[in-house]
Amino acid sequence: PGAFFVNPCPTDAPRKRIEFAAIQLDVTYNKKLGWHNPQQRMYVLEEHKKDVLAGRRPPEPFSPLLNVGDCVEWVLTNDLPERYGGTAFDREMHTGEVSIHQHQVHYDVLTSDGAANGWNYDGGADTGQTIRYQTYVQADVRSNSFHDHFYPAITQDAGLFGGSTVHPAGCTFSDPTTGEPVTVGIAVDVRCPGEKDDFRNFALFVEDHVPMFQPPGASSADDARFETKHGV
């Protein structure tokens, strides 16, 4: 998958491999008020997955770091539950497939579109499966957004989306605190070949319509009318 019919990448393009997973966990947005989403869905690096699920690493928006000219191999594993919802916001439904559908970059639409449109191949991973996509960063598009394309009306509200930041060829990325190289991050140091081209990069995500709950009794005496097993 990713280059069965049309390979968007030049033969001499630098290659990157991003191994990541789609996961679900209970995420608190406001600790003081207790606002939380009990079925938050997100993309996370495979190497960070266990720590995020165990609460040892705070979750953050998924923002890979790319360079112009990169040929990127995306290796996605579906670690989501097959069922979603059953709350005051969403009826219970089957969501047994996941993908990554990208914008602003080149790819073979038959095999790397992350969808199941027309005669294109089914571009999703069933629960427990892993799928590979391939994209080419053909120009300085600054950023490229992506999301699941099998249940987008459901999972985007729950947080299953992300966006890469795109930088000039030759730039490298490191953690501002440790100095260690990184492949994803919402706050990173970027060092480029030019003498005065280094900078710190920030990626900001704004999310609407998040299905959040808060503990009963936190805001109003009428909370009992709307109380559920997840909160109010």
Image (cartoon, grey):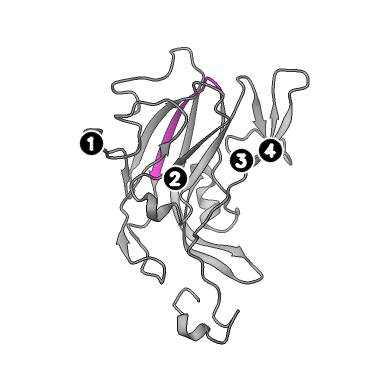
Disc 2 target residue: 21
Q: Determine the CA span between mark 2 and mark 1.
A: 26 Å
Disc 1 target residue: 118
**Amino acid found under the numbered disc labelled 2:** Ala
Q: Determine the CA span between mark 1 and mark 3.
A: 35 Å
- Going from N to C along the chain, the mark reached first, 2 or 3, is 2
Q: Position of residue 111 (x, y in %)?
A: 31, 30
**Amino acid found under the numbered disc labelled 3:** Gly
The circle drawn on residue 184 is none
- Going from N to C along the chain, the mark reached first, 2 or 1, is 2
**Amino acid found under the numbered disc labelled 4:** Asp
Q: Nearer the viewer, mark 2 or mark 3?
A: 3
Q: Determine the CA span between mark 1 and mark 4.
A: 42 Å
Q: Determine the CA span between mark 2 and mark 4.
A: 21 Å
Task: In the displayed orientation, state which residue is furthest to the left.
Answer: 119
Q: Against 1, is 225 above or below?
A: below
Q: Nearer the viewer, mark 1 or mark 3?
A: 1
Q: Which type of secondary structure does the marked residue at label 2 adopt?
A: strand
Q: Which type of secondary structure does the marked residue at label 3 adopt?
A: loop
Magenta stretch, overall SS: strand
Disc 4 target residue: 175
